[in-house]
Image (cartoon, grey):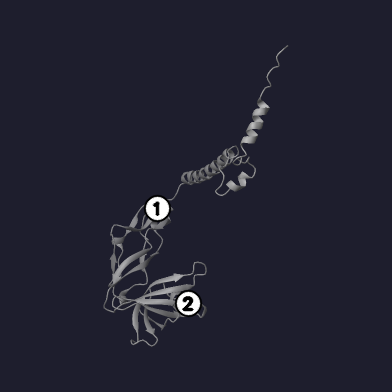
């Protein structure tokens, strides 16, 4: 991979809210770190990094980073990670990993397919990607932007495994060689589609039935008073008699319930 030049500046605003102010000026916060250097906060042009990503096949970029007022004229670095805004996709932050020209690096590289698989063309199969990125080890100059595999001869029910992929010169593919990367799956039959649709409909109906049952069962049930609702509930309830006042009502009740003794007949 050929390195591309990129200008960077020491970051001045590192406090809370500084990143937003920095983005408002058209720059993006970044950081560079390496095995033999201390991490350094940087800022780069949002337009420059955006253009580099736009013209690259992937976000695996090798840059000659020139930091303003730095003792070294250029610093070779890999773009380790790019954070994007979830809505508009704008670059929010960039991580650079400083490397040496003679130091092998391990990077995840996208895998792309070319050609139409025989199982798709002749048997209406479905081409499925099991692995979208491959882990490789190589020198920075040998790092590929992506790895391309030809799936033309892939038949129905067959898979292309990691060990069957030919790596570019100077590149070593790391991982279990028996792992499938791309497969041609059997097409779904009409019966399977009907069963899947019916299962989804039944599952949705069960949810509605359960909800209805809960609502029906809740009509005749008394709800437990909510926390803190005791005060409001006491307003309509009969208050307990105060101390010293209990005797009077009890006596009145006793008198009301007493029967007068029968008068003796003369």
Residue 156 located left or right of residue 209: left
Locate residue 241, reporting x and y percent.
61, 40
SS state under label 1? strand
From the viewer's perspective, tell me whether residue 89 is left or right of residue 134. Answer: right
Q: Is residue 118 above or below residue 11?
A: above
Q: Residue furthest top?
A: 266
Question: In the rendered image, which quarter contains the N terminus?
Answer: bottom left
Of all residues, the one furthest to the left in this rendering is: 102
Q: Residue at x 31, y 68 (%)?
A: 136
Residue at position x 37%, y 69% from top?
A: 146
Disc 2 marks which residue?
18
Identify the secondary structure beneath mark 2.
helix
Q: Is residue 214 visible?
A: yes
Residue behind mark 1 = 185
**Where is residue 54 drawn, in percent x and y?**
46, 75
Q: Is residue 215 above or below residue 62?
A: above
Of residues 32 and 223, the one drawn nearer to the viewer in this rendering = 223
- Does residue 58 appear in this view? no
Q: Nearer the viewer, residue 247 or 99?
A: 247
Left or right of 222 in this view: 36: left
Q: Earlier in the sequence, mark 2 or mark 1?
A: 2
At a point 38% along the width and 84% down the height, the residue shown is 66
């Amino acid at each position: 991979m050929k390195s591309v030049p990129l200008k960077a500046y020491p970051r001045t605003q590192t406090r809370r809210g500084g990143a937003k102010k920095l983005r408002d000026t058209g720059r993006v916060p970044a950081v560079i770190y390496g095995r033999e250097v201390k991490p350094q906060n940087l800022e780069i042009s949002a337009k420059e990094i955006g253009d580099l990503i736009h013209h690259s096949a992937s976000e695996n970029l090798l840059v000659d980073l020139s930091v303003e007022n730095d003792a070294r004229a250029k610093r070779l670095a890999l773009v380790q990670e790019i954070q994007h805004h979830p809505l508009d996709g704008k670059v929010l932050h960039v991580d650079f990993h400083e490397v040496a020209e003679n130091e092998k690096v391990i990077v995840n590289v996208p895998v792309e397919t070319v050609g139409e698989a025989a199982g798709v063309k002749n048997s209406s199969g479905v081409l499925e990607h099991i692995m979208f990125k491959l882990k490789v080890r190589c020198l920075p100059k040998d790092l590929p932007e992506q790895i391309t595999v030809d799936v033309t001869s892939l038949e129905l029910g067959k898979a292309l495994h990691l060990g069957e992929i030919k790596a570019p010169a100077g590149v070593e593919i790391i991982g279990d060689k028996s792992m499938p990367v791309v497969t041609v799956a059997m097409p779904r039959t009409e019966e399977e589609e009907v069963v899947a649709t019916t299962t989804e409909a039944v599952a949705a109906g069960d949810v509605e039935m359960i909800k209805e049952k809960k609502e029906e069962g809740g009509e005749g049930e008394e709800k437990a008073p909510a926390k803190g609702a005791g005060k409001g509930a006491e307003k309509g309830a009969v208050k307990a008699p105060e101390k010293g006042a209990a005797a009077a009502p009890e006596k009145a009740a006793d008198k009301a319930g007493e029967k007068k003794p029968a008068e003796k007949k003369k």
